Image (cartoon, grey):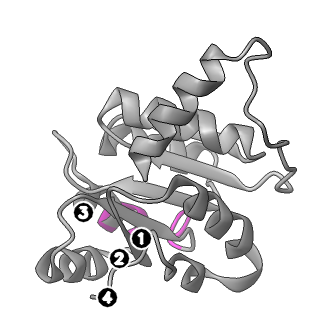
């Protein structure tokens, strides 16, 4: 769960080496755009995915996400839905309407994971939905597999909703 990442960060910071027990992997430069308005969540997720070997960029709102995705389209976008200003639904619609970014899978990441919200995320163009809190390691594993297997990898314990 995302809370586990907070614990992992504290543990890592308390070790003399400053490094977690596992070894980083090389994920062939898979580019992930993390869109999250809460700075702590955004920073922790960015740090963890970078450690896992992903090339990560981050945005605090939908406007920044659209700009970053157009400048250098990522391989996948992790999109918070409820954000001030341009929210995740609006940003996803704009990205899916743009020929430059329409092909990029958008994974909705939301704490409001009831069936209507899942459906509205799908209607906006999200390719999958991950429920907060989620298992951070399961998310990293899914991202490692997604390039070869597609967005179906996000349908796994610790991440998926049955919506």
Which secondary structure lies at badge 2? Answer: loop
Q: Where is 70 relative to 18, above or below? A: below
Q: CA distance from mark 4 to mark 1?
A: 23 Å
Which label sits in the foreground, 4 or 2? 4
- Disc number placed over residue 125 in the picture, else none: 2
Q: Magenta span has 99?
A: yes
Which secondary structure lies at badge 1? Answer: helix
* Residue at the spot 24% in from the left edge and 59% down from the top edge: 90
Q: CA distance from mark 4 to mark 2?
A: 17 Å
Res 100 seen here: yes
Q: CA distance from mark 4 to mark 3?
A: 20 Å
Q: Which residue in the protein does label 4 denote?
A: 162
Which label sits in the foreground, 4 or 3? 4
Q: Which residue in the protein does label 3 denote?
A: 89
Q: Where is 55 relative to 11, above or below? A: below
Which residues are drawn in magenta? 93-102
Q: Is residue 19 left or right of residue 70?
A: right
Q: Is residue 62 left or right of residue 68?
A: left
Q: Which residue in the protein does label 1 denote?
A: 96
Among the 4 quarters of the image, the one containing residue 57: top right
Q: Are marks 3 and 1 in contact (CB under 8 Å)?
A: no
Q: Are marks 4 and 1 in contact (CB under 8 Å)?
A: no
Query: Disc 3 or 1, which lies upstream in sequence?
Result: 3
Q: CA distance from mark 2 to mark 1?
A: 7 Å
Q: Are marks 4 and 3 in contact (CB under 8 Å)?
A: no
């Amino acid at each position: 769960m995302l809370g586990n990442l907070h614990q992992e960060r504290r543990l890592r910071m308390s070790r003399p080496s400053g490094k977690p027990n596992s070894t980083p992997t090389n994920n062939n430069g898979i580019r992930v755009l993390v869109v999250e308005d809460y700075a702590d969540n955004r920073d922790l997720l960015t740090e963890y995915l970078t450690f896992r070997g992903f090339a990560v960029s981050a945005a605090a709102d939908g406007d920044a996400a659209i700009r970053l995705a157009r400048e250098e389209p990522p391989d996948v976008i992790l999109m918070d839905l409820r954000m001030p200003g341009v929210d995740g639904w609006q940003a996803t619609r704009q990205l899916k309407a743009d020929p430059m970014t329409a092909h990029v899978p958008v994974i909705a990441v939301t704490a409001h994971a009831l069936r209507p919200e899942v459906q509205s995320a799908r209607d906006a163009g999200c390719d999958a939905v991950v429920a907060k809190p989620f298992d951070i390691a399961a998310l990293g594993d899914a991202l490692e597999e997604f390039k070869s297997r597609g967005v179906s990898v996000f349908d796994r314990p610790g991440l998926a909703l049955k919506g």
